[in-house]
Amino acid sequence: MTDTLHPAPVRIDFVSDVACPWCAVGLKSLETALARLPEVKADLHFQPFELNPKMPPEGEDIEEHLTRKYRSTNEQRQQIRQHLRDRGAAVGFTFTEGARSRIWNTFDAHRLIHWAGLQSAQAQRDLKLALLTAYHTSGKNPGDREVLLDTVAGIGLDRAEAARVFDGGDFADDVREAESLWQDRGISSVPAVILNEKYLISGGQPPEAFEQALRQVMQEMAEEGSTQA
């Protein structure tokens, strides 16, 4: 029997990459929606996805990268960036103009995000947001060892333990397996937000889209619980 006073949590798999600006918008939109729905208990898991898994450690100039990858013009990129700044501001995330000058490899960031999740769900969320902020707001390299360790320490996690994880190559297999799993499930772009392993919300949607989806999931869970009572 389902306890209607204490509903089951909604599992949320947030598939994303630190390099993805729309992932920052999606995360803050999701959190805004959850804040509007205090009755929803979220079981949030951050899942790895690399937009550029073959990116070398030295990275690539962002203008060259976007021109080559998307065939976009400078005018188009400027319009997109302004749109991102506006969307970010609406949900409390700052995209600093010109901060993101290079694209970097994010595999080690995913390893530390995985490690943080073993500490607690809150630690994983805090590190994810802090790394998004380090890159998109402050223009730091999310693949750099010292940036990663400083960010870990900045949210109150053990810097020395994180250094051991980083230097030892820990959780590399876990990250690769998770990336393969989500790709096998059809995820090819991010953010991809999956509710209860069943419903997919794609892209950096506004809070209202997440709120509507969460309400529908909660209603479905309540109806399923009543039929089992």
Image: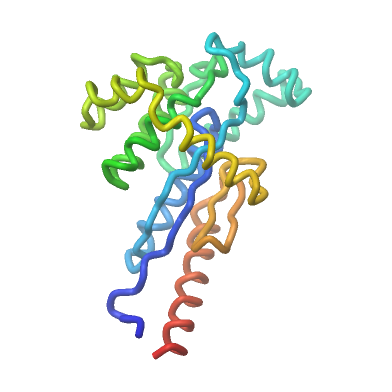
Q: From this viewpoint, is residue 222 visible?
A: yes
Q: Quadrant of residue 93?
A: top left
Point 72% across, 22% down: residue: 75
Q: Is residue 64 left or right of residue 212?
A: right
Q: From this viewpoint, is residue 86 visible?
A: no
| Camera-nearest residue between 185 and 43 | 185
Residue 206 lies, in percent from the top left, at: 53, 51
Q: Is residue 107 left or right of residue 92?
A: right
Quarter containing the C terminus: bottom left
Point 75% across, 26% down: residue: 70
Point 37% across, 59% down: residue: 42
- The colour scheme of the drawn protein is rainbow
Residue 5 lies, in percent from the top left, at: 28, 79
How many numbered badges does the structure rendering display?
0
Q: Is residue 86 above or below residue 106?
A: below
Q: Is residue 7 above or below residue 57?
A: below
Point 28% across, 45% down: residue: 120
Q: Quadrant of residue 35?
A: bottom left
Residue 146 lies, in percent from the top left, at: 34, 14
Q: Is residue 227 above or below residue 66?
A: below
Quarter containing the N terminus: bottom left
| Camera-nearest residue between 228 and 156 | 228
Residue 184 lies, in percent from the top left, at: 65, 47
Q: Quadrant of residue 43?
A: bottom left
